[in-house]
Image: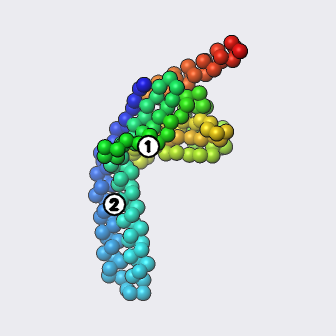
Amino acid sequence: MYKCKPERNPRQALLLITLLPFISCVAFFISSIIRDDFRLIAQLIAVLIFTFSVITVVRYTLTEIEYSVSEETFTVSKKVGNKMTVLCSVDISSIITLVDKTTYEHSTDFTDVVIKYNHCQNIKTQSYVLVYVANGKKCMIVFEPNAIFVKLINEAIENSKKNKEEKNIKE
């Protein structure tokens, strides 16, 4: 089993940790000095901004994503603090293709993808798209592996296809 942890972008983490709480404080300050007619709406907006800030900081700075691939499965795990959770596990034989995100966006072959998952650790990063079939539906996972891990996944996909062909020939 091979594992890959994407490197965290320290500039992005610092920006999120400082900028989002600042924006929340400004929103609460503005909601406290606004006229009584609109104070409730301003406070609700400030609470929404604060909630969005907390969710974003937890999602992109406190969460660690780990990808792993074996001969049979591709797995995405999430670690927050000491708690490790498996987000998804995909059988290698069900994978259709692995392409970079720009190829995916410009291709017309993937317009019938129904379920989409984003398992990136950084915002606006060089990411790849894994397209697979689950329960008869085309699904995709956006993630950010390194070049070595992409090569390993492609090898696992090729080996799975060869094994499938060999089984069909024997039958």
**Amino acid type of disc 1?**
Cys
**Amino acid type of disc 2?**
Leu
**Closer to the camera in the image, 169 or 142:** 169
Do the numbered discs 2 and 1 sit on residues whose CB atoms are within 8 Å? no
For label 2, the residue is 20
What residue appears at the point 42 percent right and 72 percent down from the top-left corner?
45
Specify the quadrant that holds the N terminus: top left
Q: Is residue 126 visible?
A: no
Categorize mark 1 by other alpha carbons within 10 Å: few (<14), some (14-19), many (20+).
Answer: many
62 relative to 152, above or below: below
Tell me if 41 is positioned left or right of 105 in this view.
Answer: left
Q: Secondary structure at mark 2?
A: helix
**Closer to the camera in the image, 93 or 146:** 93
**Closer to the camera in the image, 125 or 88:** 88
For label 1, the residue is 120
Label disc, if present, on residue 98 of the rendered structure: none
What residue appears at the point 32 percent right and 81 percent down from the top-left corner?
33
22 relative to 15, above or below: below
